[in-house]
Amino acid sequence: MKETVKLVLDELTERYPRLEACRKEIEDAYLLLEEAYDHGKKLLIAGNGGSAADSEHIAGELMKRFKYSRPVTEEFAQKMIVIDAIRGEKLAKGLERPLRAVPLTSHIGLMTAYMNDVDAQGVYAQQVLGYGDEGDVFLAISTSGNSENIVNACVAAKALGLKIIALTGSKQCLLQNYADVCIQVPESETFKVQELHLPVYHCLCLMLETNYFGK
């Protein structure tokens, strides 16, 4: 891990000393994500309620600039300019290189069709089957760690060869049985767990961006 990346994690635990308890798991989760992105893979994310909103939030931080500039490559810029000189030049200045992340919470048509036709508990598993590739990472967010549709998605993800990161609370839970890394923040009440999830995933996003785009 680069020293600049480690400094991001150091700052997290300085600002949130209670998260020192899961520092190793945060580092391990980062290394899984780095390995995936190094090999051209992507991140799938899912959760329910507030954790669904977190899924969208994480994708927003990864798919565009979070802190550092992410200009497109000169090669890609020139390709767009050749296709359309005016639009290509404007896009070359505005587009930002992504770290590919897919929030499975976003596909309302697919989700409601599957829930109506089949079963609400398999809605994320179906999307993992459709979008997941071996070597991708699935981030399973559940404050209880026992959400049935998230656990089902983990079963599908493992069968496909995805790595699994679970983001949960402090209680023993089902996701521990499936996750390659389980980050259990030191709270058990739902809203308090969610309050600690945000700095954890912000840290992961910033660690990744620092690695690939930092100064």
Image: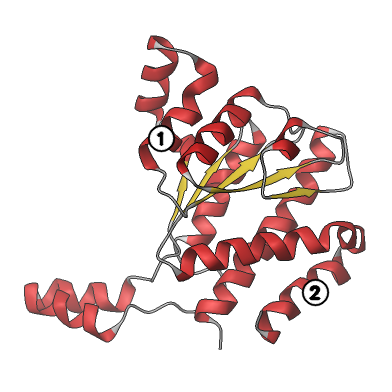
200 or 152, nearer to the observer: 152
Outermost residue, bottom side: 215
Where is residue 103? Give x, y as percent.
Answer: 48, 44
Is residue 96 depicted above or below 89 in this figure? above
Q: Residue at x 47, y 79 (%)?
A: 69
Q: Residue at x 69, y 64 (%)?
A: 203
Where is residue 109? Give x, y as percent.
Answer: 35, 26
156 or 215, nearer to the observer: 156
Which label sits on residue 129? 1
Tag 2: residue type? Answer: Glu
Horizontal arrangement in the rendering, residue 55 relative to residue 65 (left or right): right
53 or 31, nearer to the observer: 31
Marker count (numbered): 2
Q: Residues within 10 Å of mark 2 (few under 14, many from 20)?
A: few
Horizontal arrangement in the rendering, residue 38 relative to residue 81 (left or right): right
Horizontal arrangement in the rendering, residue 204 relative to residue 169 (left or right): left
Q: Which residue is mark 2?
A: 11
Mark 2 vs mark 1: in front = 1
Where is residue 65? Give x, y as percent.
Answer: 49, 69
Tag 1: residue type? Answer: Leu
